[in-house]
Every structure is written in structure tokens, then in C-alpha cells.
Image (cartoon, grey):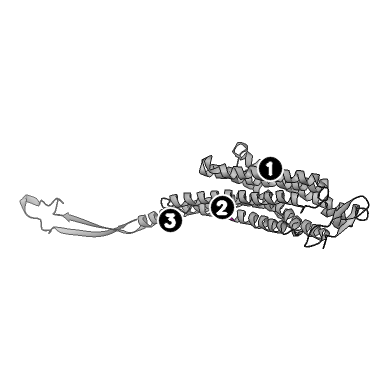
């Protein structure tokens, strides 16, 4: 049975494929994106705090700060464009657009749709680029990031070429064969880049932890960093895999998942910085308290030791006579007093 279309004398707007209706999917997507965007605002504030807390201007990591601001700016712009699209589809062009709101939201050739998806591609490339940069930092080898870099470049090519095809689309259907192949490739490459980069990063941190754990007297924080990285990678990967599955199945739920990806990327990126910073300050506080406690305990032990009664045995031999206390009597006569031994116990504090 052919796919139903909204037909006018001048233009044809095919309905998007299965799943929820397009207008319903758009409303759900902006609602969920708004909730996640609120969390991303809080995470952005926390990240700015983690990057600037107790740091002078020259100590701030400027590249990471710039990336954080760019991710938040792109997420904000994406949210604004979605609000504009909702207002256009449900209010402004509700009664004038051929096919109504559902056809409006299904038309992928519109400028607002192209702009919001271009922002998503840039957001993805920024986040994956940071993961690759972290791999280079911990491995200290350019060879280890060759494959992730190739995947990153392939992601960029497939993403922007897909945007070009969307701009040239005449039927307005994102699930058309030519367009869908490049978009599917973009999702798959983005997922592969993130999983490979995160996996290399986690494996290196685990190796470092295993090598230094036997020689370290105190408990370190490397495993905590490992858990944070794994959590962030899983959060992003689960949403991206769901988006890919929905798109391959030509389900309109992919629009919902795609809009959720923008704030999720920002949240996952900021989550690593915030949790690592909190753990660092917590560990410093615990170490400081532990050192102070040990110092206090040592002072207490010294004080108790110094206050402990010391038993001192003093032996004294005294020879007395009428005129001398040195044991020599008058005229060579023995003293009438017997020598006596005086024993005393004294307690010294």
C-alpha cells in the first residue's frame, strides 16, 4: 500500500514513516529536551565552578573552558530553534501550511531543521574531539589516536554531506534512500568514535592504576575517574544507539531521541569535569583531616608519655658523727651512729 501523502496542485509532502505522528513527536521531543536542558544548565554552572574554583586566571584550562562554553551555547541555540519550530508549526503556519502541522514538521528541507541538525553535528564533533584529545594526553602517543581520528574525520564528512543532501531534498523525507544512508553512516561512525576513544581512555587509566596501586601508600582516585568516564560514555552511547535503531527502523521516535542528544552530550561532558573536581577536593579534605588527626594523635601520645609517673630509686649513704657527716669520727674513733641507707621513691612529672 503506498505511503499516504498530503497532495496540493503544486507540491507533494509525504508523510514521515511509522511511529508516533510528527506533531506529537515534536511536542514530546521539545518537552524532554527542555527537561534535559535544565539539567545541562546546572551542569554547566558546576563545570564553570570546577574550572575556576581556587584557580587564578593563568591556571584555568582555557581549551576545555572554551569547549564547555561552545557545547552549552550550541545546546541553547538548538533549544531556541526548537521553540521557534513549535511556534511556527502549531501557531504561525497551522492553517496555511499544506498538510497542517504534521507535514510542516516532516519537511526536512526547512532552514530551521537544517540549522538545528548542523548544530548537532558540530556538538558531536566537539565532544568526540575532546575524547580523542584525552586519549592522546594519557597515552602520550600520536599512534594510539590514529584510528579514532580517522573515524572522527569520517563522522564529519558523513554528517555534513548528509546535511547537504537534506538541503537539496525535494520530497522532504529524511528516510529517503540517498539521505538515510549517509545519516545512518554518521550515527554509526559517531558511536564507533566515542566507544573507541572512551575505551582506550578507560583502559589506559586502568593500566596506570594497576601499576601504581602496589606502590602507593594511600588510596588513589584513578578508579573513581575510570567510573566517571564509563558512566558518561554509557549515558551518551545508550541514547545514540536508541536513536540509530529508531532511524534504521524508519520510526519517528528518532526525532525525539535526536533532540535529546543535544543536552545529553553537554551533560555527559560536564559530568566528567564536575565529578572529578568534587572527588579531588573531597580527597584533599580527607587527606588533610587524616593528617591533622594523625598529628593530634601523636601529640596526645607524647603528652601521655610525658605525664606518666617515673619511678626513680635514689640510694644515699650517710655517715654521721658529732662534728662531721663524712663518716670520720673524732680522734679516729668510730662514729656512734651507724651508717644508714636512705631509700626514697620520687614521682617526676
Q: Residues within 10 Å of mark 1 (few under 14, many from 20)?
A: some
Q: Which of disc 1 and disc 3 is earlier in sequence?
A: 1
- Expressed as whole percent of the image width and height from the top left, the position of residue 336 reads 10, 58
Whether residue 92 appears in this view of the structure is yes
Comparing 60 with 265, the one in front is: 265
Q: Which contiguous range is marked in magenta?
A: 226-230
Q: Is residue 74 left or right of residue 85?
A: left
Label 1: state its secondary structure.
helix
- Residue at numbered disc 1: 157
| Residue at horizontal 9 percent and vertical 52 percent from the top | 329
In space, the residues marked 3 and 1 are separated at their CA atoms by 64 Å
Say which quadrant the N terminus sits in: bottom right
In space, the residues marked 2 and 1 are separated at their CA atoms by 38 Å
Label 3: state its secondary structure.
helix
| Residue at horizontal 58 percent and vertical 52 percent from the top | 229
- Expressed as whole percent of the image width and height from the top left, the position of residue 112 reads 81, 47
Choose mark 3 or mark 2, whichever is in front. 2
| Residue at horizontal 73 percent and vertical 51 percent from the top | 180
| 171 vs 311: above or below | above
| 276 vs 136: above or below | below
- Expressed as whole percent of the image width and height from the top left, the position of residue 198 reads 58, 50
Whether residue 69 appears in this view of the structure is no
Amino acid at each position: 500500500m503506498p505511503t499516504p501523502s498530503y497532495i496540493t496542485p503544486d507540491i507533494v509532502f509525504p508523510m514521515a514513516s511509522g511511529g508516533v505522528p510528527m506533531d506529537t513527536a515534536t511536542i514530546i521531543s521539545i518537552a524532554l529536551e527542555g527537561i534535559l536542558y535544565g539539567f545541562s544548565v546546572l551542569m554547566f554552572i558546576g563545570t564553570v565552578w570546577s574550572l575556576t574554583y581556587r584557580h587564578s586566571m593563568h591556571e584555568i584550562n582555557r581549551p576545555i573552558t572554551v569547549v564547555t562554553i561552545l557545547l552549552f551555547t550550541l545546546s541553547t541555540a538548538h533549544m531556541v530553534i526548537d521553540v521557534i519550530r513549535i511556534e511556527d508549526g502549531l501557531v504561525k503556519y497551522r492553517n496555511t501550511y499544506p498538510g497542517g502541522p504534521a507535514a510542516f514538521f516532516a519537511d526536512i528541507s526547512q532552514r530551521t531543521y537544517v540549522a538545528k541538525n548542523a548544530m548537532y553535528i558540530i556538538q558531536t564533533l566537539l565532544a568526540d574531539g575532546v575524547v580523542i584529545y584525552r586519549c592522546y594526553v594519557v597515552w602520550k602517543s600520536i599512534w594510539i589516536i590514529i584510528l579514532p581520528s580517522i573515524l572522527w574525520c569520517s563522522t564529519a564528512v558523513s554528517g555534513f554531506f548528509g546535511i547537504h543532501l537534506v538541503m537539496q531534498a525535494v520530497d522532504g523525507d529524511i528516510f529517503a534512500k540517498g539521505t538515510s544512508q549517509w545519516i545512518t553512516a554518521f550515527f554509526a561512525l559517531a558511536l564507533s568514535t566515542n566507544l573507541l576513544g572512551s575505551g582506550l581512555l578507560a583502559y589506559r587509566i586502568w593500566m596506570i592504576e594497576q601499576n601504581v596501586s602496589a606502590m602507593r601508600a594511600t588510596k588513589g582516585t584513578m578508579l573513581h575517574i575510570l567510573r566517571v568516564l564509563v558512566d558518561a560514555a554509557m549515558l551518551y552511547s545508550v541514547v545514540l544507539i536508541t536513536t540509530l535503531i529508531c532511524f534504521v527502523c524508519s520510526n519517528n521516535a528518532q526525532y525525539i531521541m535526536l533532540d535529546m542528544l543535544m543536552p545529553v552530550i553537554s551533560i555527559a561532558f560536564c559530568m566528567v569535569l564536575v565529578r572529578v573536581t568534587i572527588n579531588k577536593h573531597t580527597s584533599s579534605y580527607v587527606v588533610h583531616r587524616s593528617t591533622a588527626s594523625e598529628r593530634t594523635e601523636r601529640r596526645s601520645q607524647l603528652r601521655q608519655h610525658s605525664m606518666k609517673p617515673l619511678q626513680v630509686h635514689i640510694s644515699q649513704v650517710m655517715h654521721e658523727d658529732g662534728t662531721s657527716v663524712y663518716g670520720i669520727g673524732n680522734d679516729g674513733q668510730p662514729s656512734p651512729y651507724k651508717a644508714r641507707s636512705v631509700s626514697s621513691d620520687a614521682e617526676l612529672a
